[in-house]
Amino acid sequence: MEGLQSSTQGPLVLLVLLLGPAWHTAAHRCPQTCICDNSRRHVACRRQNLTEVPSTIPELTQRLDLQGNMLKVIPPAAFQDLPHLTHLDLRHCGVELVAEGAFRGLGRLLLLNLASNRLSSLPQEALDGLGSLRRLELEGNLLEELRPGTFGALGALATLNLAHNALVYLPAMAFQGLLRMRWLRLSHNALSVLAPEALAGLPALRRLGLHHNELQALPGAALSQARSLARLELGHNPLTYTGEEDGLALPGLRELRLDHGALQALGPRAFAHCPRLHTLDLRGNQLDTLPPLQGPGQLRRLRLQGNPLWCGCQARPLLEWLARARVRADGACRGPRRLRAEALDALRPSDLRCPGEAAWEAAEDDEDEDLAAAAPRGPPRPPTQEEASSATPCPDVCACASESRHAGCAGRGLRAVPRGFPDGTELLDLRRNHFPLVPRAAFPGLHHLLSLHLQHCGVAELQAGALAGLDRLLYLYLSDNQLSGLSAAALEGAPRLGYLYLERNRFQQVPGAALSALPSLFSLHLQDNVVDRLAPGDLAAARALRWLHLSGNRITQVAPGALGPARELEKLYLDGNQLREVPTRALEGLPALLELQLSGNPLRALQDGAFEPLGRSLQHLFLNSSGLEQISPRAFSGLGPGLQSLYLQKNQLRVLPALPNLSQLELIDLSGNPLHCDCQLLPLHRWLTGLNLRVGATCAAPPSVRGQRVKAAAAVFEACPGWTARKAKRTPASRSSARRTGIKRRH
């Protein structure tokens, strides 16, 4: 009997030793609604209508599956009793809120899955305590914005999935702190704007997914921040053109996808600064021709299927370049008739006929080809009558792509807005036509339209009801026209409009009355008009406004209270105006302002407390090229740890006070100032020496240190009062004494 008892207890003792006492005791209190796999330390509580995390889960659990419950809120320290978790699945739990500190204590967690919930925001410290996390799934939520610093505690994160949310823009430093991030998924959102520094701080990023968004211009400046990118996915965006001016510079890029967009033309040097590009995907666009591409010397694959390629004389340079560069290209000819459906890679340059070549002039096909060769370069030619009969309805002078739901009529010399577009059209491009007057109900039947382009159309007036029926419109481009005013009646019919572009018109004041028809307006662009002041009431109806662009106007005054109604304002661009002082009183009542652009104004001096109303919110301040000669010692009082970047370059500063309160600066630019390195500058020298930042501050005088960095010009400050005392604090004797004192204190 004793032998039997010892033989049965032996394995049990061994199991306890292997798994530890905590798991052994916890195994007997597995929640009734869960399944516990003790051997693998997995616990699954799927679809049990749980409203909170069970409290009796074994402490040594490593994988916890709670998907399909009804948690709604993840409270602070919800998993603090499970410090050994490595995988946590919270999919389909109806989560609407993750409290600050919800995951504290999960220092070993590698995977957190919060996909398919109802999160509309993430608090600043919601993800604190996840220092080992490698993968974060947030796909299929309702996120509308990302606050800089949200992911700052996730230093080990390699994959972040934000697909299928409601993101409209990416702010600067949105992913700050993600130094090991390799794959970022942002597809299937509504992104139309990326701040120039949106992707800064991602040195390891290799793959970026931005397909299925609303990008209408290639955000080259933002993308070029991610210098290590190897794969970039930009398909299914309404891009109509890209060229070298977009500024895409990615030295390690290998694959670029621009498929199923609205590309009508491509600049020959569009990818000149992507020398390692191997695969370029341009399928499903509206390209009828393509120039030889300059720059990407390693390009080997060019995908052109689904483009209306015209294989006429003008395509010879393309074929010659493909052969010379050994690029394999797919795609088929749309015309002329004798080459219709011919594979591009099966053609030789001599197969493409040019008008005037005697051997071909008698051929019937040459008539089509002559017309194509004589046509001006630009958007794809309209379909022939034969093709149109079997295609989606579309005005004769336009090109409609059913797959991308885009319609293009740019540069066709139109004098009136065409009619008869497909019902599902989402983007309508009418640029560079001539519509001095946009009449009432100008866009019938376009109930699904999201983006309307009317740039360079000579528009001087929108009649009342011009936008009637466009109840889903998000983007309205009226830049480069002759508008001097807008009425609310003209904009009625587009209540969801979020982005209104009015740059380079003739506005002398902000069209405040018109904004009452736009309750959802997010971003207002009035750059390069002739606005001379901001008056109270101008923004009375702009309560949802986040971005206000007033650069390049003639503004001399921003009246107190003029900005007050826009309490959600995050970015204010007043650069390039005629302001002679900071409009401090006008900045009151803007608790959400993150970025203030005042560069290029004749400010000359900054007085005490100039930015005090913004002390709790401001993160980025631009004062460069403002003729600044003097900054008072308390000019930045109130701006504390929140300020991340300060731009003071290209001013006339000879002296500058130290700024010890700005303890969290990540960027300060003092370059281009004639700093006089004498004893008045000693406090600044000391402060800069304690910063681990490149600031660009150099001495302009005296001649002995001209051109030296202020940080490094210690010799010129040695004669200043206070320098000896500072050195004495750092002598070896004092340092060793300090060490001894520190040792005694520790003992």
Image: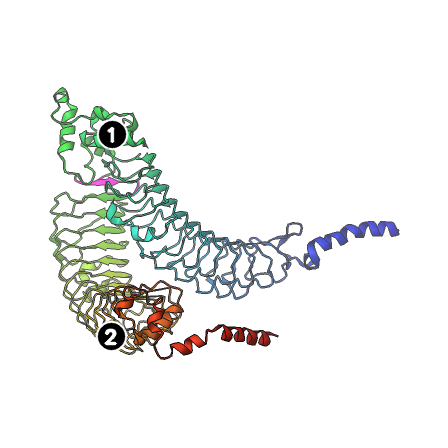
Q: Position of residue 185 (x, y in %)?
A: 41, 50
> Is 162 on the left-hand or right-hand side of 71?
left
Residue placed at 15% from the left, 48% from the top? 432
Q: Position of residue 342 (x, y in %)?
A: 27, 26
Does residue 398 show up magenta in the picture? yes
> Is 604 on the left-hand or right-hand side of 646?
left
Q: Which mark is on residue 538?
A: none
Q: Main secondary structure of the magenta part?
A: loop
Q: Which mark is on residue 630?
A: 2
Return the residue at label 1.
320
Q: Position of residue 198 (x, y in %)?
A: 35, 56
Q: Nearer the viewer, residue 426 or 224?
A: 224
Dot 1 amino acid type: Glu
Residue placed at 28% from the left, 67% from the top? 704
Can residue 596 be seen?
Answer: no
Q: CA distance from mark 2 to mark 1?
A: 61 Å
Q: Nearer the viewer, residue 227 or 630?
A: 630
Quarter of the image with the C terminus is bottom right
- Look at the numbered disc 2 and give the secondary structure of its residue: strand
> Is 140 on the left-hand or right-hand side of 627?
right
Instruction: State if disc 1 and disc 2 touch (CB < 8 Å).
Output: no
